[in-house]
Image: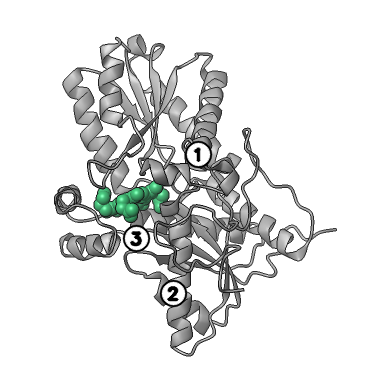
Amino acid sequence: MPDESATSPYDALLLLSFGGPEGPDDVIPFLENVTRGRGIPRERLKEVGRHYYLFDGVSPINEQNRVLLAALREDFAGHGVDLPVYWGNRNWAPYLTDTLRQLTADGRRRVAVLATSAYASYSGCRQYRENLADALATLTEEGLTPPKVDKLRHYFNHPGFVRPMADGVVAALADLPEDVRAGAHIAFTTHSIPTAAADTSGPEPAHGDGGAYVAEHLDVARLVAEAVREATGEDHPWELVYQSRSGAPGTPWLEPDICDHLETLHGKGVSAVVMAPIGFVSDHMEVLYDLDTEATAKAAELGLPVRRSPTVGADPRFAAAVRDLVLERAAAERGEPRERCALGTLGPSHDVCPVGCCPARTPRPAAAGADSPYA
Ligand SMILES: CC1=C(CCC(=O)O)c2cc3nc(cc4[nH]c(cc5[nH]c(cc1n2)c(C)c5CCC(=O)O)c(CCC(=O)O)c4C)C(CCC(=O)O)=C3C
Ligand SMILES: [Fe+2]
């Protein structure tokens, strides 16, 4: 009988995230880390800095990750999965390079990596693979022999990610005043990205017309809307919209923006809206500012009742999904068959990003993919 808790060949799990500032003095250095070499207009940076200062310079993301780490450790311990869990970030302490150095010092040789981004895109996938390659290069230059890193597949359609979001939308609808509830629309939101990045997201066969990024979000939106219909008996109209646009005004990014969308729905006489941030794994600053502050103020100005549904965060079902992804990949690496959980029409995502998946504007080494220089 196959061992249901076997993690071999892995000897660690690495939670790989974005990182965020933890006080007012961190905000500028954090934004410099995020935007180094990315050509974001000065004005946009000032504006985004203002969002962080409204919350005393503290992004919610690090605390959310600490809670998720605790949930993962508890879930693993409760299911006989003996795998230490580490945490490293792209843009703030604990920095990925330092965590990988620690993994090396602890003798870890093969690491499964979970990125806190559920979908395919340059920012949510390849950029993390570039960060891994940079960290591996630094450690190699230091004369160390870092572990091999394997990035776990995208989990947008894993039931442990979709079901908590569906329950959250049901709860948000129930929280609306009864007289506006039946006519409420669901606005599924995600991070806007340049249309050029969307069109090339995912493996090459998915390229064009929003690419894997848009297709994956549409699949999740459909799944959540269906689950909501089953739970409430009501058919709530829904749309996929975008938020948190940056970049130069002349560059096309995915639209419509959530605030414009609220205005359009209000103009059509829609009674209420639930904003469902399916693009975010936990309550990032984009959720706290762009939705809970900016879009909510816009709705108040319009007199449009809105609610924001929760992100998955550290839901025990998500922690269980991460365990499932680790065990699934471990079995695949051992050459053993194992079910790959996925809802919707797209099926489980690939384990190893093929060549040409979510290409960078300027090609750079990326680990944990078919084009990785690190075997
Ligand atoms: C697709 C996507 C995700 C979701 C997937 C994932 O989670 O990875 C995401 C997450 C995040 N983005 C974050 C913060 C920022 N993103 C920026 C800039 C950008 N994001 C982009 C895309 C994405 N970003 C893009 C195309 C840019 C333009 C510049 C570039 O091409 O790189 C900027 C610069 C200022 C600005 O332009 O807004 C900041 C401060 C935080 C932390 C929030 C917190 O503190 O809680 C998180 C989790
Ligand atoms: Fe971002």
Q: Residue at x 54, y 85 (%)?
A: 145
Mark 3 or 1, nearer chain start: 3
Q: Residue at x 40, y 61 (%)?
A: 362
Q: Looking at the picture, how far across and down is residue 93, in whole percent?
A: 33, 69
Above or below, 288 relative to 265 = below
Q: Nearer the viewer, residue 281 or 318?
A: 281
What distance separates the C-alpha of mark 2 from that of mark 1?
32 Å
Q: Residue furthest right?
A: 1
Label 3: few (<14), some (14–19) or many (≥20) C-alpha neighbours in 10 Å: many
Please state which of the two labelled residues, at mark 3 or mark 1, is closer to the viewer. Answer: 1
Secondary structure beneath dot 2 equals helix
Which residue carries the number 2 mark?
A: 135
Mark 2 or 1, nearer chain start: 2
Please state which of the two labelled residues, at mark 2 or mark 1, is closer to the viewer. Answer: 1
Which residue carries the number 3 mark?
A: 19
Above or below, 171 relative to 233 = below
Decide if ligand 1 comes within 8 Å of the CB at mark 3: yes
Q: Nearer the viewer, residue 174 or 137?
A: 137
Kindly check if marks 2 and 3 are in contact, taking CB atoms under 8 A apart as contact.
Answer: no
* Colour setup of the view: one colour
- Residue type for callout 1: Gly
Secondary structure beneath dot 1 equals loop
**In the image, is 233 to the left or to the right of 99?**
right
**The N terminus lies in which quarter of the figure?**
bottom right
Q: Is residue 164 visible?
A: no
Decide if ligand 1 comes within 8 Å of the CB at mark 2: no
Q: Looking at the picture, how far across and down is residue 231, in whole percent?
A: 54, 21
Secondary structure beneath dot 3 equals loop
Above or below, 262 relative to 257 = above
- Residue type for callout 3: Gly
The mark total stands at 3
Which residue carries the number 1 mark?
A: 208
